[in-house]
Every structure is written in structure tokens, then in C-alpha cells.
Image (tube, rainbow, N blue to C red):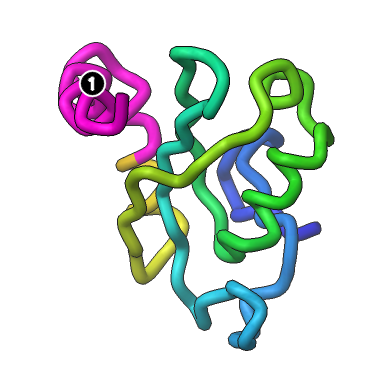
Amino acid sequence: MRRIAGSPASTRIRSSMRGGSNGRTKNMFIVYLLKSDIANKSYVGVTNDIKRRLNEHNSGKHAYTKRYMPWTIIYMKKFNNFIDARKKEKYLKSANGRKFLKKIFDTFK
């Protein structure tokens, strides 16, 4: 795993940034919103490999998302670098960002 210099330990890039046909986007990062298919729950995250990340959420590898499987992607936005993607993720987790996401989430009920 690689860390971005000057960032907290929780800000990690979990896989390489090489392009490929398996869901990774070359030098791109994706902020995504998941909706649980069984509960009125959502999850916001950032990744550079959306297929792998969705598979992790739907296979029970993470405590929060394991409880509300399966998950569906209902929003994605691509960024050219991790810093901009992380800023968007943090915004979406703020009060104003949650208001924006609620509008999207409500269209998928």
C-alpha cells in the first residue's frame, strides 16, 4: 500500500494506479455512493477500481457494509487525482453533501 505524503494514515491507496480492463481507471479516482438493496442505508467511498471495491462491499469484507448487503452503485464521479476525489468524498459526508446525496438516494427508492 502507498500513502500520500502528509496525509493521515487512513488516507491510503490500496492498489496500483495502472490501467486495466478490470474496473481500474488509469490515474483516475472514483467517488461513489452505494445504496443497500435491503435497507434504507447508503455508503460513500473513493477508489481507483470500482469493480473490485463493489465486490469487497458485497462479499462482507467490511463491517458496516456487511450488515446491509447487497449494495448497488447509484452515483459515481471521476477525478484525475486522489486529493480532489478525497475532497469530494469529505464534502459528500458533510451535512450539505448529505442533502445533495439524499436527492439522488430518494430517486432510487
Locate the C terminus and report the quarter of the image it occupies: top left
Q: Amino acid at mark 1?
A: Lys
> In percent of the image, x 69 and y 39: which residue is there?
57
**Camera-nearest residue between 47 and 66:** 66
The location of residue 92, given as percent across then percent down, is: 31, 29
Q: Find the magenta span and give its range.
A: 89-109
**Camera-nearest residue between 72 and 75:** 72
Looking at the image, residue 103 sits to the left or right of residue 80; the answer is left
Which secondary structure is most common in the magenta stretch? Answer: helix
Q: Is residue 104 magenta?
A: yes
> In percent of the image, x 70 and y 36: which residue is there?
9
> In percent of the image, x 59 and y 86: which residue is there?
19
Q: Is residue 57 magenta?
A: no
The location of residue 96, given as percent across then percent down, is: 17, 18
Above or below — where is 11 with respect to 66?
below
Q: Residues within 10 Å of mark 1 (few under 14, many from 20)?
A: few
The location of residue 85, given as percent across then percent down, is: 38, 51
Locate the N terminus and report the quarter of the image it occupies: bottom right
Which quadrant would residue 101 be assigned to in this image? top left
Q: Which residue is mark 1?
A: 102
Looking at the image, residue 98 sits to the left or right of residue 10; the answer is left
> In percent of the image, x 72 and y 51: which residue is there?
55
Looking at the image, residue 4 sits to the left or right of residue 72; the answer is right
The location of residue 105, given as percent across then percent down, is: 28, 27
Q: Dot 1: what SS? A: helix
**Camera-nearest residue between 106 and 75:** 106
